[in-house]
Amino acid sequence: DAGVTQSPTHLIKTRGQQVTLRCSPKSGHDTVSWYQQALGQGPQFIFQYYEEEERQRGNFPDRFSGHQFPNYSSELNVNALLLGDSALYLCASSLYGGRYEQYFGPGTRLTVT
Amino acid sequence: GDSVTQMEGPVTLSEEAFLTINCTYTATGYPSLFWYVQYPGEGLQLLLKATKADDKGSNKGFEATYRKETTSFHLEKGSVQVSDSAVYFCALRNSGYSTLTFGKGTMLLVSP
């Protein structure tokens, strides 16, 4: 049973560019949440997708956007990258809008130069 | 809003020593509480959880008890191993929401 997978593993971008990160949830899961983990910090909630809609959003600017596809996979898009966007981006999947345990992927390490 | 405070690390122990990592929280309602572990270069793994006051979560020798009166969820292990070296995160999920609020994490280093 495949767990949560994320791609790419690592990514280096320049300030002002745009980036897309991808997540495939654990088999059978229908809800995807995205978190940003800055170096030495705990993960911070970005947003959650369920039934192809953004259901909840944390305190992140509109530069952060997402999408969920009919197969429940999800993308995180960040526009106009800032140096402060450098972080580990974690995807977590769960069932029924996140009311059950969240399973985390290995993350995508984004470096903005 | 909701918040989680953990003791700062790193916590440095010798193998077979007793471990305590303190965690306190602030939340409205009746949150569920979690401990996650992150090994180097990996994502988060759920270690244990407790969903109501006085519940004790346990897994792999680790334990934590949900103390509503002190708003705490301290992580303990009687005898740590080198393989327990990792970063440990305390987190809560408020009953009205499905998102997790994390503490800053505590690094544990265990030497042989």
Image (spheres, rainbow, N blue to C red):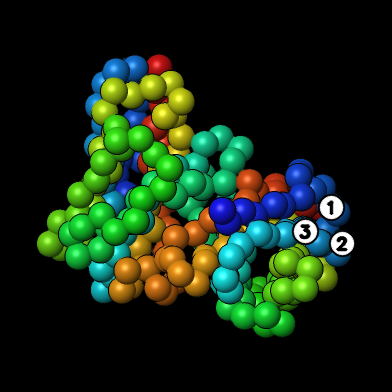
Say which residue appears at 46% left-offset and 34% top-offset. Answer: A87
From the viewer's perspective, is residue A86 above or below residue A42? above
Sequence-wise, the earlier of marks 2 and 3 is 2
- In front of the other: label 2 or label 3? 3
Residue B22: mark in rendering: 3
Q: Are marks 1 and 2 on the same chain?
A: yes
* Snapshot quadrant of residue A14: top left
Mark toward the start of the polypeptide (3 vs 1): 1
- SS at mark 2 in the image: loop
**Residue A65 placement (x, y as % from top left):** 26, 41
Label 3 close to label 1 by CB (< 8 Å): no
The numbered disc on residue B4 is: none
On what subunit does the disc labeled 3 rest?
B
Q: Quadrant of the N terminus of chain A?
A: bottom left
> Comparing marks 3 and 1, which lies closer to the viewer?
3
As rendered, which of B101 and B13 lies closer to the eye? B101
Q: Secondary structure at mark 3?
A: loop
Give the Cα distance between marks 2 and 3: 16 Å
| Crowd tier of the residue under label 3, counting other residues whose Cα lies within 10 Å: few below 14, some 14–19, many 20 or above | some
Quickly name the residue at label 1.
Answer: B13
- The label on residue B17 is 2
Does the CB distance between marks 1 and 2 fall below 8 Å? yes
